[in-house]
Image: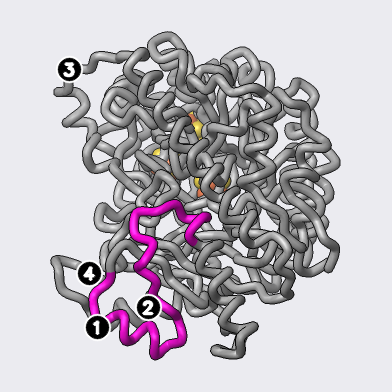
């Protein structure tokens, strides 16, 4: 499951002119040629053309919506409503293990009052925390009282925090008014199909109007309700993001049609996520051996939809009680026991001051990238390479190779550096020594990359990476990601042009299967 | 016969609780239980027992054969 929303766009403390913001959005999204369909497109501009300025205003500081903002702002989820009204073949609601961080899974169920206190505690500790989501486990709208009670309490005590909601959409049309009343204006709907024939392969049953429906009939009701809910929300100006789970052989081709259907109903962002399924998750797909997509398959599908609308690439398929920057989980610091013992003082001023500093950093980052791009201007080449980056946020190359839990992947071309996704990996350096097996896993996870940018790297993994054909790059430690990536790419092109090296295409990469999707 | 919940299978998802027309379901020590005195097998309300229809784990809300069938009051 994943999340999105907000109400007061100016609450973040960003005072830049609207024009500047739109400029910044166009900048950081970058332009690229979309894959499958072969037509050149600039995702951000296509989106912007259709979207009123107020929407961009809402999006720009939202870590789940804006790829660039997610380096700087944090979100948290609270699990207050674990009930669900449908069953998905990629979800096993029984499985919850304290040792494993998996999306959609949560260890601690909170009352609305506990959740409100947790939000205050986290917001006071992590000033970058700007977004609160209710995303499950389960469907928040299958338990509307608890969901809306939580929103009510938070909007009273911390009005600057944006609220968002993720839903499977079955109950959505019944709650659109409440969603509007609580100023929840970002809603994520998981839509995996618009064709009930396909839906019947994904959803074994739904519970609707006091009856359990199965098969085609169930999927038909679900898709009708999802699309109706989407229309009702966008009519009211409430931002809608669509999540889709890419299930090879079931809905992978069909998602292009889903993309068209949701775009025409006003959805502004489409997030296509890979199916994650292992037998040990105990899901229907996990048990019957349904595979997930490879990194290349996922990227090709995202690229082919990109001309239609903005694609979201930085989704982490977060845990339902995740806390912190995307890709980071600090939930263990905020267990119910610890929160209830905490003395919380909510200081909106300190938060605002902190966020203003963050904005300055962002502007500097965009400017630095601009400079480097100017250097690249004029160069023309069809070469495109992927590069992986070890980062812990702020848009900097600031993570040790051995400490990286994930790598961010950028596509480098003469058009610049475009973020295309992230790869989760197991820790290479656990307890200070490298483990051979995990290095192999890392190489598999970034095998489609030509280079990996790190703040620091030991001699041993360095050698193995080079052997695998991936260049470890540590000369840009603690510098801005995009600026450095473009500089490196420029040097790479130069070397190719001088005939010093030969450009070779890389192979595919593997998406880590250590997580279970639960994508309401 | 009233329904009962097999505690070892219940995921404590709470989906059944709000669906019961008789408020027969409540949380007890982490799992959910049905008060057999309140359960009417959903007779007179719905075509199917709501707890069974909404529960994500098959065969978790089941008939308690050790107890007599529900009798509608006259
Ligand atoms: S993924 Fe979400 S919507 Fe699907 S069964 Fe699980 S909790 Fe329900
Ligand atoms: S069968 Fe109906 S009345 Fe009995 S516990 Fe289940 S929902 Fe309640
Ligand atoms: S719906 Fe089933 S699993 Fe969920 S609380 Fe009720 S009995 Fe337990």
Q: Position of residue B2 (x, y in %)?
A: 43, 36
Q: Quadrant of residue A486?
A: bottom right
Tell me the number on the disc at residue A429. Answer: 4
Examine the rendering and report whether any part of residue B47 can be seen: no
Name the residue beneath numbered marker 2.
A441
Q: In terms of secondary structure, where does tag 2 sit? A: helix
The chain to which mark 2 is attached is: A
Most foreground residue, A279 or A301: A301
Q: Position of residue A14 (x, y in %)?
A: 52, 23
Position of residue A123 relative to residue A438, above or below, is above
Q: Earlier in the sequence, mark 4 or mark 2?
A: 4
The chain to which mark 4 is attached is: A
In the picture, measured across the screen, residue A201 lies left or right of residue A82, that is: right
Q: Residues within 10 Å of mark 1 (few under 14, many from 20)?
A: few
- Quote the CA–CA distance across marks 4 and 2: 13 Å
Q: In terms of secondary structure, where does tag 1 sit? A: helix
């Amino acid at each position: 499951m994943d999340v999105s929303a907000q109400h007061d766009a100016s609450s973040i403390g960003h005072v830049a002119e609207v024009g500047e913001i739109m400029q910044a959005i166009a900048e950081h999204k970058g332009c690229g040629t979309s894959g499958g369909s072969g037509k050149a497109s600039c995702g951000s501009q296509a989106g912007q053309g259709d979207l009123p300025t107020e929407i961009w205003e809402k999006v720009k500081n939202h870590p789940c919506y804006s790829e660039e903002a997610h380096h700087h702002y944090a979100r948290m989820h609270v699990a207050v409503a674990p009930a669900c009204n449908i069953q998905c073949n990629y979800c096993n609601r029984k499985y919850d293990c304290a040792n494993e961080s998996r999306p959609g899974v949560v260890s601690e169920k909170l009352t609305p009052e506990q959740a409100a206190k947790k939000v205050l505690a986290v917001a006071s500790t992590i000033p970058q925390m700007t977004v609160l989501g209710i995303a499950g486990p389960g469907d928040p709208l299958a338990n509307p009282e608890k969901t809306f009670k939580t929103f009510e309490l938070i909007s009273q005590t911390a009005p600057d925090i944006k609220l968002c909601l993720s839903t499977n959409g079955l109950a959505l049309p019944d709650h659109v008014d409440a969603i509007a009343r609580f100023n929840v204006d970002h809603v994520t709907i998981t839509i995996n199909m618009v064709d009930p024939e396909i839906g019947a392969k994904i959803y074994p049953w739904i519970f609707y109007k006091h009856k359990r429906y199965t098969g085609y009939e169930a999927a038909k009701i679900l898709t009708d309700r999802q699309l109706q809910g989407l229309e009702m929300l966008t009519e009211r100006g409430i931002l809608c993001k669509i999540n889709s789970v890419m299930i090879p052989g079931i809905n992978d081709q069909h998602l292009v049609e889903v993309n068209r259907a949701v775009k025409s109903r006003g959805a502004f962002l489409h997030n296509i996520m890979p199916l994650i399924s292992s037998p040990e998750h105990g899901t229907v797909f996990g048990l019957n051996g349904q595979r997930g997509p490879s990194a290349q398959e996922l990227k090709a599908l995202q690229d082919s939809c990109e001309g239609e609308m903005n694609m979201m690439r930085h989704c982490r398929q977060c845990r339902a009680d995740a806390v912190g920057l995307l890709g980071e989980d600090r939930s263990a610091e905020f267990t119910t026991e610890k929160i209830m013992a905490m003395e919380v003082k909510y200081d909106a001023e300190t938060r605002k001051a902190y966020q203003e500093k963050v904005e300055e950093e962002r502007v500097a980052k965009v400017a630095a990238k601009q400079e480097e791009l100017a250097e690249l201007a004029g160069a023309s080449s069809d070469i495109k390479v992927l590069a992986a980056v070890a980062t812990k946020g702020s848009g900097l190359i600031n993570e040790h190779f051995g400490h990286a839990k994930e790598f961010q992947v950028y596509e480098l071309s003469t058009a610049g550096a475009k973020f295309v996704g992230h790869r989760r990996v197991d820790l290479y350096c656990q307890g200070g020594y490298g483990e051979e097996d995990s290095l192999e896993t890392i190489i598999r996870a970034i095998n489609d990359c030509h280079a990996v940018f790190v703040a620091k790297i030991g001699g041993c993994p360095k050698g193995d990476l080079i052997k695998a054909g991936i260049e470890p790059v540590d000369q840009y430690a603690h510098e801005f990601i995009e600026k450095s990536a473009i500089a490196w790419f420029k040097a790479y092109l130069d070397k190719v042009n001088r005939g010093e090296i030969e450009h070779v295409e890389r192979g595919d990469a593997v998406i880590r299967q250590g997580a279970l999707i639960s994508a309401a | 016969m009233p329904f009962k919940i097999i505690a070892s299978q219940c995921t404590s998802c709470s989906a059944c609780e709000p669906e019961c027309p008789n408020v027969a379901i409540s949380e007890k020590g982490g799992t959910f239980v049905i008060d057999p005195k309140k359960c009417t097998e959903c007779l007179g309300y719905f075509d199917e027992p709501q707890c069974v229809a909404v529960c994500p784990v098959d065969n978790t809300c089941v008939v308690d054969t050790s107890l007599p069938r529900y009798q509608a009051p006259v």
